[in-house]
Amino acid sequence: MEGEGELLSARPALETEGLRFLHVTVGSVLASYGWYILFSGIVLYAVLQKLSTRLRGLRQRQLAGAEAALEPDVVVRRQEALAAARLKMQEELNAQVEKHKEKLRQLEEERRRQKIEMWDSMQEGRSYKGSARRPQEEDGPGPSTSSAVPKRKSDKKPLRGGEPAASEPHVRDQDVTSGNAGMG
C-alpha cells in the first residue's frame, strides 16, 4: 500500500508542476502579445456581427423571393411592369429613329436642291460656285471681285493624274509662262 501512497503524492506534484508551466507560458504569451490578442478579438467579434446581419438579410430576401415566386399575382405584376418598361424603351427608340430619318430626308432634300441649282446655273453658262457667292457679295458693300485677291492655283496637273508638281517647280513655272499647261 505504500506504493500506492507514493503514486498519489507524486501525482499532485506533477499536476501542480504542469499547472505552473501552463501559467508561466500563458502569462508570457499574454505579456508579449496581449494587446494584439485583444485587438484581434475585437476585430473578429465585429466581423462576425457584420456577417451574421448580412446572412440574416440574405435569408430574409430568399424567403421573400420564394414567397413572391409562389404568389401568381406578384409574378404577373412583375411581368407586366417589365413589359411596360420594355414598351416605353421601344417607343423612345422608335422616336429617335424617326428623328434620324427626318434629318436624313432633310439632308437628301438639301443635296437634291443643290444639284438642281448647280444644273440650272450650268445651263445658264455660269459656274455653280460663282453663283453661290454672288448673293453674299451683292448684299454687302464690299470690294468688287476684280479687286479681290485672286485664288491660288492648284498644284495639281490634271493630265498627269493629279500629282502635285511641287517636286518640279521649274517645269510648272515654264508651263504657266509658256501657256503649255500639262505638257511638261
Image (cartoon, rainbow, N blue to C red):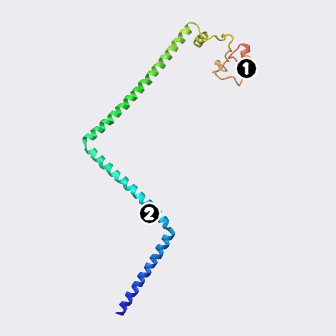
The x, y position of residue 11, in whole percent, is 39, 85
Left or right, 114 with respect to 73, comes to right
CA gap between label 1 and label 2 equals 93 Å
Residue farthest to the top, as pictured: 124
Q: Quadrant of residue 69?
A: top left
Please name the residue that numbered disc 1 is placed on. Answer: 171
Q: Which mark is residue 132?
A: none
Mark 1 residue element: helix
Q: Amino acid at mark 2?
A: Gly
Residue 27 position, x and y percent, is: 48, 73
Q: Residue at x 28, y 38 (%)?
A: 77
Q: Residues within 10 Å of mark 1 (few under 14, many from 20)?
A: some
Q: Residues within 10 Å of mark 2 (few under 14, many from 20)?
A: few
Q: Nearer the viewer, mark 1 or mark 2?
A: 2
Q: Amino acid at mark 1?
A: Val
| Frontmost residue, 55 versus 39 | 39
Give the numbered dot on residue 41: 2
Residue situated in front as seen by the camera: 132 or 126: 132
- In primary-sequence order, the first of circles 1 and 2 is 2
